[in-house]
Image: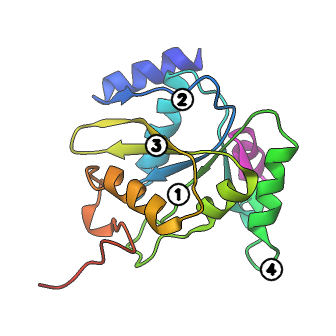
């Protein structure tokens, strides 16, 4: 039912979803970019349902888990994170992959919908430590298209791997382009 409703919703708003998650990828870090609007989540969630991906987990600050919103976001796959402590989040999250047969963890490396100078690198270190691939997912507002892009198996060479990621996202259009930055390679300048 979710698949049908999601496909209908996406059709009504004029969006198409491309790509599929390879069947053998039961555990992965999915990165989602560009992330400049609340619509990214809605379109992305509908996109995942439309291609048969029922459960995608994501990290969210623990303060959001209070009633009445807490049970709702938990049912959507939210995992609480205590950002007030330096608690080795990368190690904690990477260990979650050990205890789960299926875990697709969605991360927005920008960390905010506003402009930021630097993407957070935690997604890369989680995938490297957990020995899982990074799947590039996207929304492209210019084309009204979203989906699953390439799969990257981290080499341990961050700069080389991040260049691969940057080259993919360079062709994607954010809802609010002025808020999208492919740092560290695309620093904005006032010229």
Pointer 2 residue: 21
Residue depicted at x 29% and y 60%: 176
Q: Is residue 172 magenta?
A: no
**Decide: marks 4, 3 in contact (CB < 8 A)?**
no
Q: Is residue 190 left or right of residue 28?
A: left
Point out the tag, 2 or 3, that comes first from the N-terminus: 2
Instruction: Report the quarter where the N terminus lies.
Output: top right
Instruction: Report the quarter where the C terminus lies.
Output: bottom left
Tell me the crowding category of disc 2: few under 14, some 14 to 19, or many 20 or more residues within 10 angstroms, Cα based.
some
Q: Choose between 16 and 64: the one closer to the eye.
A: 16
Pointer 3 residue: 137
In this orientation, does residue 34 appear? no
Where does residue 154 sit, x and y in percent of width and height? 58, 53
Where does residue 182 sit, x and y in percent of width and height? 36, 66
Residue depicted at x 46% and y 43%: 137
Residue depicted at x 57% and y 56%: 155
Q: Is residue 101 left or right of residue 185?
A: right
Work out how far the residue at label 4 is from the one at label 3, CA to CA, in angstroms.
29 Å
Pointer 1 residue: 108
| Badge 2 element | loop
Point out the tag, 1 or 2, that comes first from the N-terminus: 2
Pointer 4 residue: 85
**Decide: marks 4, 2 in contact (CB < 8 A)?**
no
Q: Choose between 43 and 103: the one closer to the eye.
A: 103
């Amino acid at each position: 039912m979710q698949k049908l409703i999601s496909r209908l919703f996406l059709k009504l708003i004029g969006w198409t979803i491309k790509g599929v998650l390879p069947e053998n990828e039961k555990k992965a870090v999915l990165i989602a970019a560009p992330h400049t609007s609340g619509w990214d989540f809605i379109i992305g969630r509908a996109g995942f349902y439309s291609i048969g991906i029922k459960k995608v987990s994501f990290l969210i600050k623990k303060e959001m888990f209070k009633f009445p919103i807490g049970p709702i976001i938990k049912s959507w796959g939210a995992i609480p994170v205590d950002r007030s402590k330096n608690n080795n989040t990368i190690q904690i999250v990477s260990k979650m992959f050990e205890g789960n047969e299926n875990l697709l963890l969605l991360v927005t490396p920008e960390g905010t919908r506003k402009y930021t100078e630097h993407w957070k690198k935690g997604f890369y270190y989680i995938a490297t430590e957990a020995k899982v691939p990074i799947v590039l997912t996207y929304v492209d507002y210019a084309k009204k298209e979203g989906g699953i892009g390439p799969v990257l198996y981290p080499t341990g060479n961050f700069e080389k791997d991040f260049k691969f990621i940057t080259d993919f996202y360079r062709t994607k259009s954010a809802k609010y382009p002025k808020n999208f930055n492919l740092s560290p390679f695309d620093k904005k300048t006032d010229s």
